[in-house]
Amino acid sequence: MPPNSGTEPKPEVPSRRRSSEPRRLRLALMATVAAVFGVAIYGGIHSRVRAEEQLVRTTAAAAVPSVLVVHPTLHPPQSEIALPGYTEAFTDTPVYARTSGYVKAWSFDIGAHVKKGDLLAEIDTPEVDQQLRQAHADLAAAEADLKVAQITAKRDEDLLKSRAVSTQDRDNSAGALAADAAVVQSRQANVARLEQLQSYERVVAPFDGVVTARNIDVGALVDADANAPSKELFHLAAIGKLRVYVAVPEIYDRAALPGAKASLTLDEYPGQSFEGTLVRNANAIDPASRTLLVEVDVANPDGLLLPGAYTFVHLSLPASANSVSVPSNTLLFRREGLQVAVVRNGKTDLVPVKIGRDHGQTVEILSGLKPSDDVILNPADSLITGTPVHLEDAQQG
């Protein structure tokens, strides 16, 4: 068959078609794989960008500190302070002897309640008794001499009228009469002095009270010489009313006004209080302790309170108008003065404040804060105005 015949098919054409189909399949597969890789790469890059953006946002959020805040509380219209004090007997005195001798007897021991004028002890004074007898004898002799001088003076006065004696004799007798009268007065004074000393043989209670000490016994020598140290016989205390002394700090001196009421509490009487009245103060601040000494009088009819006891004195203090209270751990001590950190519009603001009374865990703020302020608890020393913060309410927590 001739090669140029038009009816015969070409043998190369079917083989080319068959070879192009796998190529197209490979190209499609490669395009699909490339698309998948492109999508994967795009997704990875996009997720990484989103992670970096989230990290930036998280880091920025973590950089803003969280703070606990409280709201200032309005100060009560009246508050009180409790200050330590000590009790003393309203009248407390030692009892001494005014005459020397030996103790003959004593009548009351410690703890005894006595009335004014009760006999506490008797002192035997033989020397004073002997001196008193001698003084009486001297007085009798002086009175006898005075009588003779009176008679002589009267006689000389009568004889002078008849010129039987001279004027000089009359004057001498009148002078002797005056001298004897003075001697009699001196002897009388000496007798009175010794009688007074003899009356001191009876040691009596000077007021109603309790015997808190007895330092004598029968036969003990009592020396009342003014040049020698005297020995205390008894110690007497009046406890029907007690004085309570308390040192009030200078900042609270407004509570130390005479006439103010006060209450006392003691550890030995839990849950019980004793009412008293502030009667006086020292009207001067002690420069060493910066306190004002105050006296409170407390009635003690039942004798429950003892002199020398330790007690707490509660004094009422009127609070300042518009004052608030905040915890003590909100205060900042800076070079600019006392400050408190508050949060306003999400940022910190250091506010200068003026404090009133210090109650320990809380302090009274007289100016600078309002009850609606958010006050930061335990502020950092490095805190400055304008720092952004997150709020956490400590009172709700």
Image: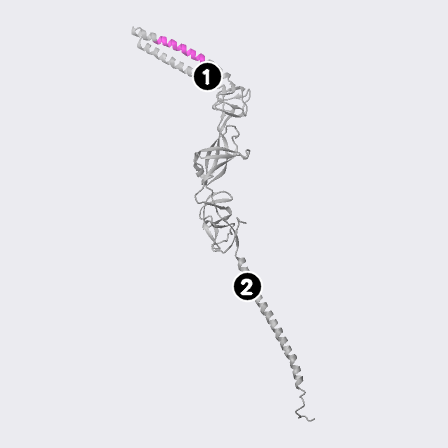
- Say if 42 sits above or below 386 in the image: below
Q: Secondary structure at mark 2?
A: helix
Estimate the x, y position of residue 117 in percent, counting from the top left: 48, 21
Q: Residues within 10 Å of mark 2 (few under 14, many from 20)?
A: few
Under mark 2, the amino acid is Glu
The residue closer to the viewer here, 337 or 11, is 11
Where residue 39 appears, as percent x and y from the top left, is: 59, 70
Decide if residue 185 is on the left or right side of residue 267: left
Q: Residue furthest right?
A: 1
Q: Residue at x 42, y 11 (%)?
A: 141
Write down the residue under mark 2. 53
Amino acid at dot 1: Glu
Nearest to the observer: residue 247 or residue 149 = 247
Q: Position of residue 98 (x, y in %)?
A: 48, 21
Count the labels in the image: 2
Give the residue number, with chain letter if any, for mark 1. Answer: 195
**Dot 1 lies on which element?**
helix
Colour scheme shown: one colour
Residue 392: % across, % down: 53, 52
Q: Main secondary structure of the magenta part?
A: helix
Residue 63: say if magenta. Answer: no
Identify the residue at horizontal 66%, vertical 86% (top origin).
Answer: 13
Can you see residue 39?
yes
Q: Quadrant of the N terminus?
A: bottom right
- Residue 235 against residue 281 in the figure, above or below: above
